[in-house]
Image (spheres, rainbow, N blue to C red):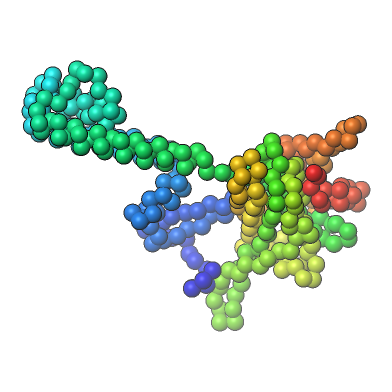
Amino acid sequence: MSGDNRLPRRPRKDRAVRSVRIGAFDLFTTGASGFDLRDPYHFIATMSWPTFFLCLVVSELFINSVFALFYIAVPGSIANVPGRSFIDAFFFSIETLATVGYGNMVPATRYGHVISAIEIICGVVYTAVVTGVIFIRFSKPKAKIVYAERPVVANHNGVPTLMIRIANGRTHTLTDASVRLNALMLESTPEGQDFRRMYGLELSLSHFPLFALMWTLMHKIDAKSPLHGRSTDALIRDGVRLLLSFEARDPALSVQVHDLMSYPAESIAFGMRYSDAVSWDERGRTSADIRRLSMIEPDLPASRSAAADSEEPPA
């Protein structure tokens, strides 16, 4: 939201475009480089798994093909390889890079020994790098937060209240959980310029020490709220988007976990509330049914007590 605050247009398809998705919110950047030789760690850690495995295969084929060309450049440098057989030299390169060596094909000349020695050094470094990269990707922590499909607006204590229900998808409790809810709105200046402004939406409870089951986030739409007095059509016309950020500590991994979610104005269900998803048995034990997380029902007076019960997440 810095620099030119005018509403950006969708980039043309013939330009280099990078996209970022936060929930249902798509962001497009033109001119930003996705790969930087000075920061390969970030590039590798953020690429998708299919792209990552494709890069591994391509790099393996490329390295072995290069060394195979070196071997066949001087015929006779590898024993038991007929002439300039690229495929035999390629398989010998794979065995050498992996430091396996089956004994059938071996370096036969000083040139072959030099090339194979260089390849063994490259193989040791390559194996160490790939092992570290795979560990980085597998060890990257995730919050595993489950979000309701739609926010709702219902009466709570006589005040229209925006509610978003989330659930802990882990089987263990997260600690020191905190959330922030913001509204991104399109506004116009007296000079006729359009820009987006971020407004913080105050929550009745934004921090919880133990997040075990479900949590219904609540924002009162009173006179202090940026959403006050706005109808559904006005929210859609102004391109309002709700941006929710989550942060907590995962005691099982001893790390901080983060997550983001966004909702467009069209997804907000006015005059609806969430159905009960938390129950207690005869022994007083609390259980939550995540399958009912997104279930909503009309905001009837008889159901208003349910929202009061769900304002604070159960321990």
Q: Residue furthest bottom?
A: 191
Res 18 → quadrant: bottom left
Residue 2: give x, y in percent of width and height: 51, 71
Q: Would you say 175 lies left or right of 303 here?
A: left
Res 110 → quadrant: top left
- The residue under the point 79% across, 47% down is 313
Residue 225 higher or lower than 108, as above or below: below
Q: Would you say 7 lies left or right of 67 here?
A: right
- The residue under the point 80% across, 67% down is 222
- The residue under the point 41% across, 46% down is 44
Residue 155 higher or lower than 222, as above or below: above
Res 154 → quadrant: bottom right
Q: Is residue 227 visible?
A: yes
Residue 26: give x, y in percent of width and height: 53, 54
- The residue under the point 30% across, 36% down is 124
Residue 121 higher or lower than 33, as above or below: above
Which of 116/182 is in front?
Answer: 116
Residue 174 higher or lower than 191, as above or below: above
Q: Is residue 6 visible?
A: no
Residue 257: give x, y in percent of width and height: 60, 48
Residue 24: give x, y in percent of width and height: 59, 51
Which of 116/302 is in front?
Answer: 116
